[in-house]
Image (cartoon, coloured by chain):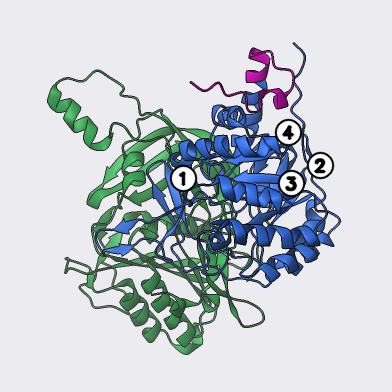
């Protein structure tokens, strides 16, 4: 895969413009960062840190109000906090950037509780995004869980570049996007699989959803099932001009890579790993990547990735 | 008053300011320059990533875990080997107006000697730091640094191979750091640097497994600073008698932290983990240090070294 030249990584103090709580403990956070909004390539990420104290915009009404407030704004938080990496979800021409995440620990909890107007410490955009030098006729986007977040920016850019979109989303929990029903029948799925995500439909995408627990309009299973059925139904002559783009948990992406290899489809995967610096200096976020020599070596997810060719990733090297 | 003097000379390692970026937090010097506003020239010296004779893949992931006011890491000295660093990395780094310190590690005394020999051939190099304190490798590393005799053997071997400034990097994971510091000086170390990380473990209570792939790792960040300050103070008592400068490090995240180290006895200081959460920290520390010197009417940073008034 061609490696795009690295852009300047901006280190900015960015005011929080909006924080929206979404279904299933998800949060969509918008901040003002014009240089990052302008330069972000789909698949790149921002490293976000909440510096210092969070300010309460108004007086507490009661003791219960204080208690409620402290649930999301813990007292005595140490100032030390490593930045947390998030794929860019959306970026606006007027300079805003959005990230979309699930609250899973201390960092995401603090970010979800950020006061409007408070400033985030942001580094971005970082890493090699998806290679879009030759946009496919049809892009098949496969998302697991919050993997749908960075794929949205990709969908937007591909749509603008004229690619058709098939978006296959698997989720074990509630989706942080707008669900509705489509009356359009997709040929590779049962007729009752009708649930779609409006944000992707607006881009002209064919969207379908898989959920672990049965849910009306959704396929019961995983995004890998949806991809498998899509590829099975695809006549071999129609594989040309199609490419797979994937983001999600490791095991799901390993399965996506396996399907892509079986059907000889190009496939780019956006990986995530626990990071220290996000700049390539600490060597923490490594995974095994095949080199030109054929041997697998640890490469940094942050700056050597986070997007890799699915064929090059040493999937079995990790549990 | 006029601009205070920030330039320091540590046993022949002449730096335009006393700020060093700590080994292992700055790779091989070419990552942070991608951040807008960051300049390698703002740094007195770069301590390069710990390097062994042969390439090393490093430890299994996860390799880092955040802790209260700190970070646990177990990278395991992932590096491309000494020859690749000398051949490919050092020539590129000469473009920056900053000093270059190779940090060398090995599993045997002989490996340390050989790595030093390889680096001694590099005209770009300004100093060698002997890493006898890495907690994350099975052989060598901190095992050498925890014993005065073994530490002296490694330092003496490197001393034979390298004529320039030689730094011994000490581990805090010992009962008494003083005899180890003394042994390193007697074996030929020109400079002592401390502290490396403190050994620690983080457990995921859901799985009852250690978070790190290597089970344990080294703790760094603001959490370790008081430990480091005391050890610098202790080592300074020995080092100053022999005219050996000390490089202090451990949890420096701002100018005041750096000033604490200088007062405790450090002639220069290293910034490491703080770079991860604030890539602009180097510039901020140098500006803050300059302001402190002006405010206290000290015309040369060297005059602040070891000025601690104990109670």
Q: Choose the circle earlier in sequence order: 4 or 2.
A: 2
Of A50 and A25, nearer the camera is A50
Which is closer to the viewer, label 3 or label 1?
A: 3
* Alpha-carbon span between mark 2 and mark 3: 9 Å
Q: Which residue is mark 2?
A: B12
Crowd tier of the residue under label 2, counting other residues whose Cα lies within 10 Å: few below 14, some 14–19, many 20 or above: some
User: Is disc 2 placed on a helix, strand or loop?
Assistant: loop
Residue matched to label 1: A83
Observer-side mark, 2 or 3, equals: 3
Q: Residues within 10 Å of mark 3 (few under 14, many from 20)?
A: many
Residue hosting label 4: B17
Q: Are marks 4 and 2 in contact (CB under 8 Å)?
A: no
Front-most of residues B110 and A59? B110
Q: Quadrant of the N terminus of chain A?
A: bottom right
Q: Main secondary structure of the magenta part?
A: loop
Give coordinates of residue B36: x percent, y percent. Answer: 65, 40
Q: Are marks 3 and 1 in contact (CB under 8 Å)?
A: no
| Chain A visual colour | green
Q: Is label 1 or label 4 in front?
A: 4
Q: Which residue is rendered at x = 31% and y = 78% of the image? A: A225
**First along the sequence among labels 3 and 4:** 4
- Magenta segment includes B295: yes
Q: CA distance from mark 2 to mark 1?
A: 38 Å
Chain B pictured colour: blue
Circle 4 Cα neighbour tier, 10 Å, few/some/many (<14 / 14–19 / ≥20): many
């Amino acid at each position: 895969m061609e490696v795009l030249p690295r852009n300047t990584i901006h280190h900015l103090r960015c005011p929080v413009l909006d924080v929206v709580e979404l279904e299933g403990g998800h949060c969509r956070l918008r901040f003002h960062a014009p240089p990052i909004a302008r330069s972000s390539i789909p698949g790149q990420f921002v490293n976000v840190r909440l510096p210092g104290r969070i300010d309460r915009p108004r007086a507490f009404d009661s003791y219960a109000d204080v208690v409620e407030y402290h649930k999301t704004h813990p007292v005595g938080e140490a100032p030390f906090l490593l930045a947390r990496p998030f794929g860019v979800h959306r970026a606006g021409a007027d300079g805003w950037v959005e990230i979309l995440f699930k609250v899973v620990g201390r960092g995401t909890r603090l970010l979800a509780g950020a006061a409007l107007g408070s400033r985030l410490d942001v580094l971005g955009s970082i890493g090699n995004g998806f290679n879009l030098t030759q946009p496919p006729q049809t892009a098949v986007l496969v998302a697991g869980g919050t993997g749908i977040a960075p794929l949205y920016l990709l969908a937007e850019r591909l749509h603008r570049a004229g690619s058709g979109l098939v978006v296959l989303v698997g989720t074990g929990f509630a989706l942080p996007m707008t669900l509705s029903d489509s009356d359009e029948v997709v040929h590779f799925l049962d007729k009752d699989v009708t649930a779609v995500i409006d944000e992707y439909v607006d881009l002209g995408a064919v969207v379908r959803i898989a959920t672990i627990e049965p849910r009306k309009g959704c396929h019961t299973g995983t995004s890998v099932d949806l991809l498998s059925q899509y590829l099975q139904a695809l006549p071999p002559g129609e594989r040309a001009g199609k490419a797979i783009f994937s983001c999600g948990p490791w095991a799901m992406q390993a399965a996506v890579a396996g399907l892509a290899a079986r059907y000889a489809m190009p496939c780019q995967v956006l990986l995530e790993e626990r990071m220290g610096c996000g700049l390539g200096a600490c060597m923490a976020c490594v995974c095994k990547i095949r080199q030109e020599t054929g041997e697998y070596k640890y490469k940094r997810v942050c700056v050597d990735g986070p997007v890799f060719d699915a064929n090059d990733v040493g999937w079995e090297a990790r549990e | 008053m006029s601009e205070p003097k920030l330039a320091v000379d540590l046993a022949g390692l002449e730096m335009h300011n006393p700020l060093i970026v700590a080994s292992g937090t700055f790779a091989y010097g070419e990552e942070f320059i991608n951040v807008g506003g960051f300049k390698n020239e703002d740094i007195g010296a770069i301590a390069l990533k710990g390097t062994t004779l042969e390439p090393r893949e490093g430890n299994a992931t996860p390799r880092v875990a955040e802790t209260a006011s700190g970070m646990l890491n177990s990278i395991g000295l992932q590096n491309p080997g000494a020859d690749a660093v000398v051949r490919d990395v050092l020539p590129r780094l000469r473009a920056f107006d900053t000093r270059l310190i190779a940090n060398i590690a090995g599993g045997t005394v002989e490996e340390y000697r050989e790595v030093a020999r390889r680096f001694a051939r590099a005209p770009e190099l300004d100093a060698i730091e002997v890493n006898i304190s890495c907690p994350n490798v099975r052989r060598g590393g901190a095992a050498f640094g925890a014993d005065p005799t073994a530490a002296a053997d490694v330092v003496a071997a490197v001393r034979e191979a390298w004529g320039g400034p030689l730094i011994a990097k000490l581990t805090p994971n010992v009962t008494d750091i003083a005899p180890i510091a003394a042994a390193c000086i007697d074996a030929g170390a020109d400079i002592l640097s401390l502290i490396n990380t403190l050994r620690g473990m983080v457990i995921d209570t859901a799985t009852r497994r250690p978070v790190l792939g290597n089970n344990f790792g080294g703790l760094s960040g603001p959490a370790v600073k008081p430990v480091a300050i005391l050890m610098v103070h202790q080592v300074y008592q020995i080092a100053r008698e022999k005219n050996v400068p000390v490089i202090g490090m451990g949890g420096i995240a701002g100018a005041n932290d750096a000033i604490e180290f200088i007062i405790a006895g450090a002639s220069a200081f290293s910034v490491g983990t703080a770079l991860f959460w604030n890539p602009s920290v180097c510039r901020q520390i140098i500006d803050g240090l300059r302001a402190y010197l002006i405010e206290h009417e000290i015309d040369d940073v060297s005059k602040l070294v070891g000025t601690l008034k104990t109670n």
